[in-house]
């Protein structure tokens, strides 16, 4: 054991530069991987823990009070798999938000459903401090005249404590002060179109009485489905719990939705019902994508580190032929020598991976506030990082196995080969011009070096290819979501520049159009609506468009938009879940129990409900949801040739028609812009951060390879200097090697990304429904990225080649 320990530490001291570089690479890989796995695990665990903490049901549902009766609830409770049904009385109302000065900051924007319920009436929520960093331990609930809002409103609408929620109940407005933010693991993510506001018991009872006095039951809202509300009406929420016996049999929330759908009379009607798994999935949609990107980068880092590790091990064996031969000659067995070399790399890798693991664990809490905004949940304590530990050990094992395979070369070293320093096993047979001649001596010398050590420089090319491909991919994603309109296009949603609504008695549509076009021509005009209906047990959002041309053609992954009332354009996630493709039939049950059959006209690449949304024609939606088809009071959306004049159009309409024309923006995705911008900013930030990492990694890679290369070519460099080559020319030739090889690899990586990057990102973003994502990467930008990487490799090599001036011709002659 003593000789083995001595050999290990002697090797570490001798090649400490190479081992430090290797440890640094593995540190970066471990850091990224630990951060990725820990974030995903902690957010997932926290989501599950909070659902248990607030006693959320395995199934959540809501419906009109007239539909979800006490008898229906007793029927659900009678199911053998159901342990309990928690009932919460609530109501919905058109809502807008004003700041403390009375300026409107958020208009009521469909299809968001604003649900009001009393604090503590069913679930027990945590209240978050105003700076979103921790919990309020002494806040028991809002006071009278106040409300708690979900954290998502901070990012969606920049809502602050002290703003006011204004409810419209029967034409009478009521203002409630925003007193704080609460954590809602059930419906707290911005991707949920249903917003829950919590009131004091007194305020809730008072407002519910006002809602009931209006006499509006919500019966016009599609027989139980919640759609964009134009009036206040009472609703009822339920949380259904599974029995412990049912859970032990493997029954989960998905199964329970189907059991309720098949086994109760209420389940056969239209309703809004979500399983616990579906609600958790909505909250973790973006988390899955971001952690997947980071995981891919971590694996690229490890592959680069592994390539460099094998190169370094091979170079170490080759340059130490004499040492290995002498050690074998004095009686040390080859297996002991192999173990010594493996242990050197294992120790360096273990240190790098361990430090990266610790750094990842320490950095993770700094990311919790950011993910709070997109998940609606706050992680307050990290769980034990089992996943990260397993990943790091897997990387360590893979590296040790590869190095062990490489060390078999030691067994082939003989005493004679040791005396020759291995020269007898090396053949110099360059392809192409072999003579160093002509006017381009530096380039000629670089070419001879490359072709004589092809394996060594192939590693540099592969590293350059991987790193440049990933950075090009990040820039392509960033370019696809760079502008506001590009965000909508990339994520498969549409937008309107303005909305108009009027009763058709005092004002005609032609007059409104004439007024708008006096400011800017109208490029498209349509009507739209939305409703949430039951689809095979779970809630699904249906959208209706009078002009499906509002959809971007690029967002249709297959087929076409619906043209007839019996056609449907369905999201990719829904299509995968149900095994549907273009031409198949989709069965949808109406509120009266009647089934409607729709032909799948196309597949939609869109974030609508995480890829579970369905688009119908406007007439098809109104018939399915049984919405009133009155011609008056219908909001019309329009797009302008000059979108920047939208505010000017609204002012012109207000000055001409006054209150006769309502210009409130009612576009279905008007409230989603901030959420999409947040996703865009996160993806862009990740791209820049990964690019900086990649450039740093390129420099480390050059440091490792060039150090070994210069040591192995020390004699050659002395010969070249004796022949008259200057230090400057040798350094330039050395940099040219890395410039040429890395340029080829970088160009190949960029070309690979441009050819297949869109498909890769589409498969990744397909986790939340965007399966037809197109990279926006001009050729000049791809070439510029390749050039930057090639220059980074070349400049790093030039800097490391300063050791050439330390080569002494006299020492080489003596040697």
Image (tube, rainbow, N blue to C red):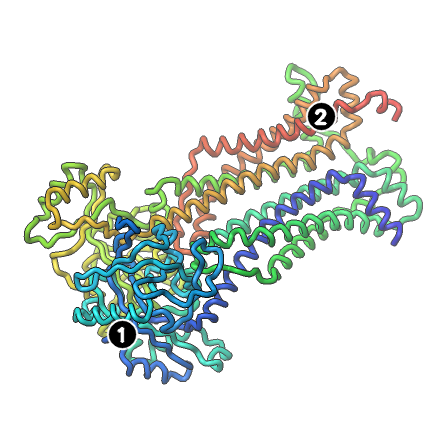
- Residue 158 % position (x, y): 36, 50
Residue at 43% x, 65% y: name it: 139
Residue at 50% x, 62% y: name it: 44
Callout 1: SS: loop
Q: Which residue is mark 2?
A: 802
Residue at 20% x, 44% y: name it: 524
In three-dimensional space, the C-alpha distance between marks 1 and 2, rounded to whole angstroms, equals: 79 Å
Q: Is residue 575 visible?
A: no
Q: Quadrant of the N terminus?
A: bottom right
- Residue 736 % position (x, y): 63, 26
Residue in the foreground of this view, choosing between 434 and 261 = 261
The residue most toward the right is 330
Residue in the foreground of this view, choosing between 560 and 13 = 13
- Residue 55 % position (x, y): 44, 73
- The tag on residue 269 is 1
Work out whether 131 lies above or below 815: below
Residue in the foreground of this view, choosing between 584 and 565 = 565
Q: Residues within 10 Å of mark 1 (few under 14, many from 20)?
A: many
Q: Is residue 426 left or right of residue 546?
A: right
Asked if the residue at tag 2 contacts the one at tag 1, i.e. Cβ–Cβ closer than 8 Å, the answer is no
What is the quadrant of residue 457 in the picture? top right
Q: Is residue 728 left or right of residue 341?
A: left
Work out whether 465 lies above or below 568: above
Q: Is residue 260 visible?
A: yes
- Residue 80 % position (x, y): 41, 84
Q: Quadrant of the C terminus?
A: top right
Q: Is residue 768 left or right of residue 598?
A: right
Q: Is residue 163 left or right of residue 526?
A: right
């Amino acid at each position: 054991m003593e000789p083995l320990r001595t050999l290990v530490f002697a090797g570490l001291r001798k090649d400490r530069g190479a081992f430090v570089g290797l440890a640094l690479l593995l540190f970066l890989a471990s850091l990224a991987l630990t951060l990725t796995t820990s974030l995903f695990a902690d957010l997932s665990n926290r989501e599950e823990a909070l659902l248990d903490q607030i006693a959320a049901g395995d199934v959540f549902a809501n419906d009109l009070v007239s539909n979800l009766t006490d008898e229906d609830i007793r029927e659900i409770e009678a199911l053998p798999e159901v342990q309990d049904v928690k009932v919460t009385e609530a109501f919905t109302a058109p809502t807008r938000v004003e700041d403390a000065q009375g300026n409107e900051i958020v208009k009521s924007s469909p299809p968001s459903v604003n649900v009001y319920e009393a604090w503590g009436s069913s679930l027990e929520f945590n209240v978050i401090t105003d700076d979103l960093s921790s919990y309020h331990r002494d806040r028991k609930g809002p006071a009278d005249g106040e409300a708690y809002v979900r954290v998502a409103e901070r990012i969606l609408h920049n809502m602050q404590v002290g703003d006011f929620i204004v409810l419209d109940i029967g034409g009478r407005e009521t203002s409630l002060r925003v007193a704080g933010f609460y954590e809602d693991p059930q419906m707290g993510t911005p991707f949920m179109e249903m917003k829950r506001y919590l009131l004091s018991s007194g305020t809730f009872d008072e407002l519910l009485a006002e809602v009931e006095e209006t006499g509006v039951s919500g019966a016009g809202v599609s027989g139980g489905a919640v759609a964009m509300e134009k009036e206040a009406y009472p609703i009822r929420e339920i949380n259904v719990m599974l029995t412990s016996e049912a859970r032990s049999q493997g029954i989960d929330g998905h199964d329970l939705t189907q059991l309720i759908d098949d086994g109760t009379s209420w389940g056969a009607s239209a309703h809004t019902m979500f399983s616990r798994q579906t609600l958790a999935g909505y909250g973790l949609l973006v988390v899955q994508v971001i952690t997947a990107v980071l995981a891919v980068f971590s694996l690229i880092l490890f592959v680069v580190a592994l390539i460099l590790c094998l190169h370094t091990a091979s170079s170490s064996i080759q340059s130490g032929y004499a040492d290995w031969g002498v050690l074998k000659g004095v009686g040390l067995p080859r297996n002991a020598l192999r173990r010594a070399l493996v242990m050197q790399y294992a120790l360096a890798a273990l240190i790098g991976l361990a430090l990266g693991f610790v750094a990842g664990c320490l950095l993770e809490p700094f990311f919790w506030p950011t993910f709070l905004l997109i998940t609606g949940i706050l992680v307050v304590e990290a769980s034990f990082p089992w996943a990260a530990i397993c990943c790091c050990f897997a990387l360590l094992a893979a590296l040790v196995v590869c190095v062990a395979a490489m060390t078999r070369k030691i067994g082939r070293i003989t005493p004679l080969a040791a005396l020759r320093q291995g020269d007898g096993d090396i053949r110099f047979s360059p392809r192409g011009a072999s003579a160093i001649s002509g006017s381009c001596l530096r380039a000629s010398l670089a070419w001879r070096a490359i072709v004589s050590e092809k394996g060594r420089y192939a590693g540099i090319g592969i590293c350059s290819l991987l790193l440049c491909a990933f950075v090009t991919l990040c820039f392509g994603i960033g370019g696809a979501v760079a502008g506001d309109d590009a965000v909508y296009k990339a994520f498969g949603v549409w937008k309107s520049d303005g909305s108009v609504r009027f009763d058709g008695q005092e004002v005609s549509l032609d007059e409104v159009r004439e007024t708008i076009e006096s400011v800017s021509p109208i490029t498209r005009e349509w009507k739209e609506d939305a409703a949430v209906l039951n689809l095979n047990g779970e809630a699904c959002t249906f959208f209706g468009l009078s002009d499906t041309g509002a959809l971007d053609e690029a967002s249709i992954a297959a087929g076409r938009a619906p043209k007839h009332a019996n056609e449907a354009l369905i999201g990719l996630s829904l299509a995968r879940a149900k095994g549907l493709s273009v031409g198949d039939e989709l069965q949808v049950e109406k509120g009266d129990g009647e089934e409607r059959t729709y032909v799948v006209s196309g597949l939609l690449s869109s974030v609508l409900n995480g890829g579970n949304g369905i688009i119908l024609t406007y007439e098809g939606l109104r018939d399915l949801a049984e919405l009133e088809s009155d011609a008056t009071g219908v909001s019309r959306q329009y797009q302008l040739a000059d979108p920047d004049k939208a505010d000017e159009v609204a002012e012109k309409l207000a000055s001409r028609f006054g209150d006769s024309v309502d210009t409130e923006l009612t576009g279905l995705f008007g409230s989603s812009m901030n959420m999409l911008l947040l996703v865009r900013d996160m993806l862009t930030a990740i791209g820049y951060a990964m690019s900086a990492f990649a450039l740093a990694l390129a420099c480390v890679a050059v440091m490792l390879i060039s150090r070994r290369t210069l040591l192995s070519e020390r004699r050659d460099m002395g010969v070249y200097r004796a022949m008259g080559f200057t230090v400057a020319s040798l350094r330039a030739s050395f940099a040219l090697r890395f410039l040429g090889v890395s340029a080829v690899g970088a160009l190949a990586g960029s070309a690979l990304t441009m050819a297949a990057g869109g498909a890769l990102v589409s498969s990744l973003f397909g986790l939340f429904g965007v399966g037809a994502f197109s990279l926006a990467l001009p050729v000049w930008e791809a070439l510029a990225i390749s050039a930057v990487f090639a220059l980074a490799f070349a400049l790093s090599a030039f800097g490391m080649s300063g050791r050439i001036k330390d080569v002494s011709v006299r020492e080489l002659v003596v040697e």
